[in-house]
Amino acid sequence: MLQSDVYQRIIEEQSKMSKLQKKIAAYLIDHAETAPFLTASKLAKHVGVGEATVVRFAVFLGYKGYPDLQGHLQEALQRKMTAAEVFAHTTDETDKPVHALSEILSDDIHNLKATLTQIDPQEFERAVETIISAKRIYIIAYRSAASIGMFLHFYLDLVLQNTELIEHADGVSEHILDIGNKDLVIGFGFSRYTKRTVEVLKFVKQRGAKTLVITDHVMSPLVPYADRTLHAATEINSFIDSFTAPLSIVNALITAVTRSEQTKVEKRLKGLEELWETFDVFYD
């Protein structure tokens, strides 16, 4: 394991490290199976240094930031841990419930900041243009990611009237049978990635459809089948993925699309308001 590039780089650069950086390096090497799953704040706590020191350590090694270093550390494991294994590695039974509140919210703040630095503004703009120009939009989001897919589908179809959420993996073929090059498939996938999501994206690419992928890492198996890719940090000190950052990306996409189609959306919303009032939808 220590022969992989990331650990080799750590070993080679040790002579140039400060005292605190050497502490981080030693911890990463000694805890090669658990450290890759720690957020920057949690790693800093375990090592006994400041979070900023951890971030600077990643940059010192030549990575874009801690998420980039963390990704390479995880790849070095050369296998996917099960949910049970991740749970065991990220759970301290001595922690009190109140600690989870501050810890996870802090992790999510870190994820939002990391995501903001990872996303290329031009790639985001191109993603918005792809959504606007699509004849039909299909959303692929399975298992826990279905929650984000449902949210995106609700608002895109509300204003564009051309969006479909494919909820059941077994029935996907009936929905995309006649998909073509004017259509767009938006796929959500986070580690551990579902096989069906990858299969669907591969198929629609072969049929010439445009694809937009929202995922957590450059090494995601969804990326090779994406025309547009938006990366979101999802790591928290838990066996679950945090969808705070991916949902923020969805919020930004919906907002940008509706602003670009302002006249059309405004007319539609006015019509909907009349219907909502007629059917007494909202509580007064």
Image (tube, rainbow, N blue to C red):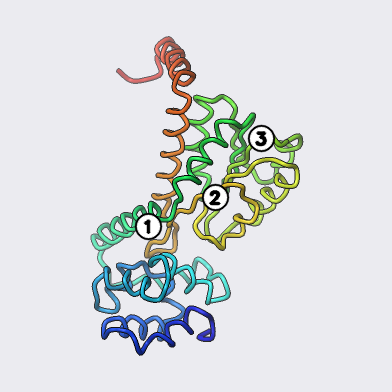
Q: CA distance from mark 3 to mark 1?
A: 31 Å
Q: Amino acid at mark 2?
A: Thr
Q: Nearer the viewer, residue 208 or 237?
A: 208
Q: Nearer the viewer, residue 109 or 55?
A: 55
Residue 19: x and y, percent?
A: 26, 86
Instruction: Tell me which residue sits at (44%, 66%) in the image.
Output: 68
Q: CA distance from mark 1 to mark 2?
A: 16 Å
Instruction: Tell me which residue sits at (34%, 54%) in the image.
Output: 113
- Marks 2 and 1: in contact by CB < 8 Å? no
Which residue is tagged 3? 183
Q: Nearer the viewer, residue 167 or 129?
A: 129
Left or right: 29, with 210 as reference point: left
- Marks 3 and 2: in contact by CB < 8 Å? no
Instruction: Tell me which residue sits at (44%, 57%) in the image.
Output: 241
Left or right: 144, with 89 as reference point: right
Which residue is tagged 2? 229
Crowd tier of the residue under label 1, counting other residues whose Cα lies within 10 Å: few below 14, some 14–19, many 20 or above: many
Which residue is tagged 1? 114
Nearest to N terminus: mark 1 or mark 2 = 1
Compared with residue 70, is residue 193 higher up or lower down, i.e. above or below?
above
Q: CA distance from mark 2 to mark 3?
A: 17 Å
